[in-house]
Amino acid sequence: MPRGHYGAPFYMIITNKDNGTFSVEGPMTDDRHWNHAVVVAQKAGRQVRCLTASGFSAEDAARSWVQRYSGKQVLPGAIVHL
């Protein structure tokens, strides 16, 4: 669900089940552009998803993701582009 515009910055995890990768995007206060990019990729047949990340930094968000799930981290913007 899109968070829209909020005052407190947050991070987003973008996952790619096609190749088992994830990226941490942010910080951001508006995720609408990222959600749109993910929907465009999904309509093109890619198995990508986006989720709000936990953590106060990109490193915290990545560490939290890897502890709960699997995948190889790639650079921000490598899975979907704005």
Image (cartoon, helix red, strand yellow):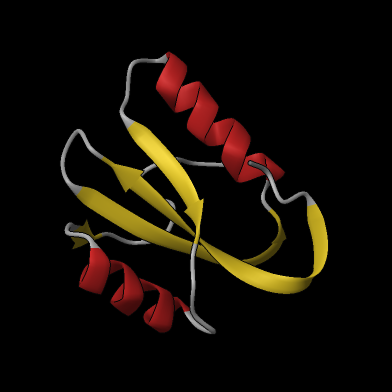
Q: Quadrant of the N terminus?
A: top right
From the top left corner, tell me how far across and down residue 37 is, in percent: 55, 34
In the drawing, does residue 45 fall left or right of residue 36? left
In the rendered image of this protein, does residue 40 appear above or below residue 7?
A: above
In the rendered image of this protein, does residue 26 appear above or below residue 56?
A: above
In the drawing, does residue 15 fall left or right of residue 69? right
Q: At x 49% / y 72%, what residue is drawn? A: 54
From the top left corner, tell me how far across and down residue 64 is, in percent: 34, 75
Q: At x 49% / y 34%, what residue is drawn? A: 38
Return the residue nearer the eye: 56 or 79.
Answer: 56
Return the residue nearer the eye: 8 or 36.
Answer: 8
Q: Residue furthest front?
A: 68
In the drawing, does residue 37 fall left or right of residue 46? right
Q: At x 70% / y 42%, what residue is drawn? A: 32
Q: How many numbered marks, from 0 up?
A: 0
Q: Quadrant of the C terminus?
A: top right
From the top left corner, tell me how far across and down residue 56 is, in percent: 54, 84
> In which image quadrant can residue 66 be found?
bottom left
In the rendered image of this protein, does residue 73 appear above or below residue 43?
A: below
> In which image quadrant can residue 28 be found?
bottom right
In the rendered image of this protein, does residue 12 appear above or below residue 9?
A: above
